Amino acid sequence: MIKPVVEGHGEVPAVPVLLRRIAGECFDVWNPPILSPGRYPAGRLIRKNDEGEPWGPGPDFEKAGGHARNEGATAMLVLLDLDDDCPKEIHEDMAPRLASITGISPSVLVFAKCEYEAWFLAAAESLAENVLPYPNDPEAVRGAKGALERHLQLEFPYDERTDQPRYSAAMNLSKVHARSRSFRKLVKEFRSLLIQCGCNPAEWPVEPHP
């Protein structure tokens, strides 16, 4: 069983929707072994004590692993937003230690650059009628939520608790995969976890079902 770990309130309902879509529509795995996400503040999962020091686990990383093991998890997927820092640097510092920290092997760490909502910008034209593709690099946007509100011309402010799962169910996966490097990383790592859990996922890309 794969245990997702997230930081935001909206990601608790949204991430299972997204992972099940990827598993089914892209990998032809229609009953993926996914547990409900655990939510922890990002600063308590990973941290850097001083400039020049390596990244390391925060106080809740080991706790998250313990909770996941109690639920029967055999794999862990940690998904966090990342604004200014380098994902490669954090991976190099933390990847060799993830399994020992969580007590779960495999454990993987994936970052949405700069926010989960950047993935919505990458497929903005699939979220509503008469919306043009987002003209800029979605992963270079600071304040993706505000950019999404403006680009979609939302009548009401973006609400992550309701809009994040709704847009996760609606966005075109092929477009996000083509336009977002961090989303491609998520797809790659999730597929490896499905294999570890005994599934037989198809190769990506497979044209998502309409």
Image: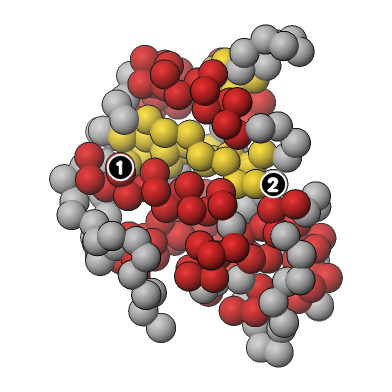
Q: Residue at x 32, y 50 (%)?
A: 191
Residue to which mark 1 is pinned? 193
Labels 1 and 2: the sequence-earlier one: 2
User: Residue 39 placed where, x, y %?
Assistant: 53, 37
Q: Nearer the viewer, residue 71 or 28?
A: 28
Residue to which mark 2 is pinned? 114
Q: Amino acid at mark 2?
A: Cys
Judge from the rendering whether residue 2 lies leftward or rightward of residue 112; answer left or right.
left
Q: Nearer the viewer, residue 97 or 60?
A: 97
Please, is residue 151 above or below residue 101 in the view? below
Q: Residue at x 25, y 66 (%)?
A: 28
Where residue 144 sits, quadrant-wise, is: bottom right
User: Residue 112 placed where, x, y %?
Assistant: 60, 46
Residue 69 visible to the viewer? no
Q: Residue at x 57, y 41 (%)?
A: 111
Q: Which mark is residue 99?
A: none
